[in-house]
Structures are given as structure tokens and as C-alpha cells.
Amino acid sequence: MNESDQQDRFSSLIDDLASQGWSQRAFFAPEVLTRELAVECRKRAQSGQLSAASVGRGGAQQVQEGIRGDRIQWLEPGQSDACDQYLQLMDGLRQALNQAFYLGLEDYECHFACYAPGAFYQRHLDRFRDDDRRTVSAVFYLNEDWQVEQGGALRLYLSDGREHDVLPQAGTLALFMSDEVPHEVLPATRERLSLTGWFRRRGAGVL
Ligand code: OGA
Ligand code: MN
């Protein structure tokens, strides 16, 4: 992808994040890459590589399906071409965010997530009580032909009291400030795949 293509991809996201604290964009990644990531996520799920996500951090981590029912696997560089391309794209976005907001974002961590039909994630903030590094949350969806009736929206609770639902349609990226926007994942009638991640700044670390 050349530089001006990348700037186009990022500029509306950055403008909206600046004005309202959240943003979303369809066709965020090239469609081929989105499809490859979906294939990879499904393959990892089918071969049993995803594990039940936990709530909390460090010694307090617990699986609690009544709060969060997704299964996840963290991405590491070098796992596949598709993952590396995605990590590169997100690194471009990290740099663009730093240029626009002087956030000092140092890295990006992300995991594949698979919600089976009926699974959900209750309303929460993405900032841990004991670790303030997560600064901007980014969720990239991998589901072709998602219909509103299938549920599964990411529901954002906005500061003016309104709610905004993002459908988990393949190619859509949702971006929001990790400590400002409470959100939840509504249950769906079909499997729901995503790449969920966080741009982090340097912090005191885990206290
Ligand atoms: C999360 C989360 C949102 C989504 O994993 O913290 O809020 O739409 N995910 O999958
Ligand atoms: Mn979240």
C-alpha cells in the first residue's frame, strides 16, 4: 500500500476520534487481507488454538463467561504473512495517531477473538485498574455479509448519553479512547470473528 492510500485510510478515523472520542471506518484494510485474516482466524479456532478469554490482570485473571464469553489468541510477529501485514498497517496507524495527538503510543497488542453464537462481553472500559498503558482501542471485524438482525453489535456508550452500535462487518475498524468509552459486545446468532487490539503508551507498567 502506498503512503497516500494509507493517509486516506487513516485521516477520517483520526478526524472523528479527535472530534468525538471514537470513530469507525468501512474497508479499513485491503479486501484480500481481510479475507486472509478471516481464514486464519477460523483455522486457529478450528484447530483448538484459541482459549477462553479471562477478565482482570496478573494474579487476578479469571475466566468468567457471565462477563465475557469470547475465545482468543494473541498475535505475534512472524506467525503468517497476513498477520504481519496487519501488524504493519496498525503500526502505520500508531504513527499517524502519535502525529495527530502526541499520545506517545509505543506499541500495539492484539488478539484474534471468536464469539460463538450467544456469547457476549458485558459493558466495560478497556483500561485496567492497575495498568494505564492501554490508550486507544481498535477492533477490526472479519465477518462477511453481517446483517443487523444477527445481533453482535459493538455498542458504544457515548459521553452525551447516546449509544452507537457498530456492526461487526468484514473490513470495518472501530477506534475509541480506551479509558473514555464504555462498551459492550451484544450476543449474535452466528459466529463473530475479530482482531481486537490496543495502542499502548509507556506507563508505570503493572503496579
Ligand atoms: C474487548 C472488546 C469489542 C468487540 O475485547 O475488550 O470490547 O467488538 N471487544 O469485539
Ligand atoms: Mn473492550
Image: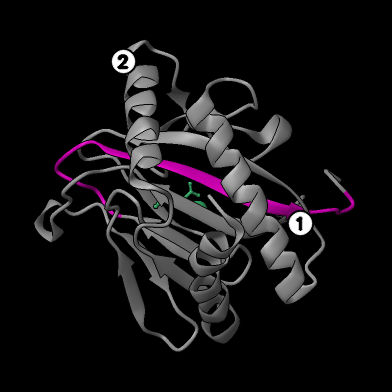
Percent across and percent down for residue 32 are: 35, 39
Residue sitting farthest toward the right: 204
11 vs 52: above or below = below
71 vs 203: above or below = above
Q: Secondary structure beneath disc 1?
A: loop
Percent across and percent down for residue 185 are: 35, 53
Place residue 19 in its image quadrant.
Answer: bottom right
Report if residue 62 is visible in the image. no
- In the rendered image, which residue does mark 2 sit on? 46
- In the rendered image, which residue does mark 1 sit on? 132
Label 1 Cα neighbours within 10 Å, binned few <14 / some 14-19 / many ≥20 = some
Q: Which mark is residue 186?
A: none
Residue sitting farthest toward the left: 149
Read off the magenta span.
Answer: 186-204
Q: Nearer the viewer, mark 1 or mark 2?
A: 2
- Residue at horizontal 32 percent and vertical 36 percent from the top: 35
Indicate the amino acid at tag 2: Gln
Q: Is residue 126 magenta?
A: no
Left or right: where 129 falls relative to 10: right
